[in-house]
Amino acid sequence: MIVFKCWRRTLRTLALLEKQFQTARTERLDPMLGWPPRAPHLTPVAQALAAAYHADADRLGEPAYHDRHHVSEAVEAMIILTDAALEASQLSRELANLGILAMLGHDLGHDGSLASPGHLEAIAVSRVTDLAQTLTPVEQDVLRQIILATAPDRVPANLARARTPQATPLDLLAALANEADVLASLLPELGCVLTHLLAEEWQPHDAERAAQTLLFSSRGDFLSIYAEPTLAARSLGLDECIRRQREAITPELDTMPRDRAMARYRARLAGWASG
């Protein structure tokens, strides 16, 4: 697991993270769901959540995109983002720890379906709550709010709210959760791989939407949602990473054969983490 002690405005941190995520996937390393919380009383809950994911995978299999690798990546991204927010004195350690735990539980019970907005998140809340009975009602409520905030239809409003002077620490935590949830997908190389996995997951449920998500224009739309990231994400260079990708997406890419378009896109992003 990467632990960044110093925060620099550089893209190399993101490039290193992308490499780590790619290695875990290509070498089929076990996802690191056994996050060791910095608050000991959270450890049994984290272990119970990890065990629930493994049991679900053994019993039901896993969706192509919303698998244990995705959860592991989201957890690690949340650790990095909340550490940056802590250094900027934007969060308390207690709230950061609960945010990380929420990311560990945010997709519990996800079956890969295209359910109505908030439905899958509500399932996760129910299951996480059952496994978090040792926590206080206030702690359980933070988990509930952050998991519900990961519903895709809530992301634009969450990110916008976190940019306002009136934003509370919980508002910021929700925005960080949104960024952590898709940080792997926002990275140039891995993002393309994950887009294909998401299309594969959606194919049995909505073939048209699955095909749509493979368009470069759709990736541009996705990137634009996160184009004004939190201060924590900007400290990693996420805004510049997104800007470079958006500049590399031009209309003619969707008129070309997929392999040629992808080669052109990757050529434009060669060395994206330099400079």
Image (cartoon, rainbow, N blue to C red):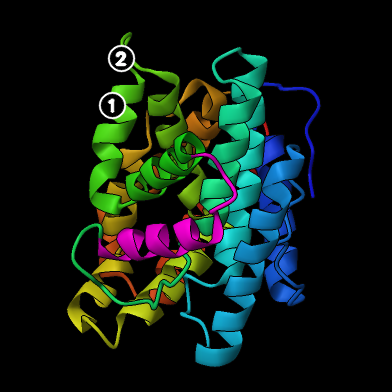
- Amino acid found under the numbered disc labelled 2: Thr
Q: Is residue 234 left or right of residue 12?
A: left
Q: Which residues are magenta?
A: 119-136
Res. 118 image quadrant: bottom left
| Along the viewing direction, whichever of 274 and 20 lies nearer the viewer | 20
- The residue at the point 37 percent across, 38 percent down is 226
Q: Is residue 149 left or right of residue 94?
A: left
| Along the viewing direction, whichever of 135 and 271 lies nearer the viewer | 135
Q: Give residue 107's position: percent from left, percent from top.
A: 46, 63
- The residue at the point 51 percent across, 30 percent down is 240
Query: What label does residue 135 carry, if any?
Result: none
SS for callout 2 = loop
Task: Specify the principal SS of the magenta part.
Answer: helix
SS for callout 1 = helix
| Along the viewing direction, whichever of 133 and 196 lies nearer the viewer | 133
Q: Is residue 269 left or right of residue 171?
A: right
Q: Quadrant of the C terminus?
A: top right
Q: Is residue 22 left or right of residue 2?
A: left
- The residue at the point 22 percent across, 83 percent down is 207
Residue 194 is covered by the magenta coloring: no
Tell me the residue that label 1 is attached to.
160
Task: Kindly tell me whether residue 187 is visible in this rendering.
Answer: no
- Amino acid found under the numbered disc labelled 1: Ala
Q: Give residue 179's position: percent from left, percent from top.
A: 46, 41
Res. 211 image quadrant: bottom left
Query: What label does residue 164 carry, if any?
Result: 2
Task: Kindly tell me whether residue 235 is visible in this rendering.
Answer: yes
Residue 22 lies, with reference to residue 45, above or below; the image says below
**What distance separates the C-alpha of mark 1 from that of mark 2?**
7 Å
Q: Are marks 1 and 2 in contact (CB under 8 Å)?
A: yes
| Along the viewing direction, whichever of 230 and 48 lies nearer the viewer | 48
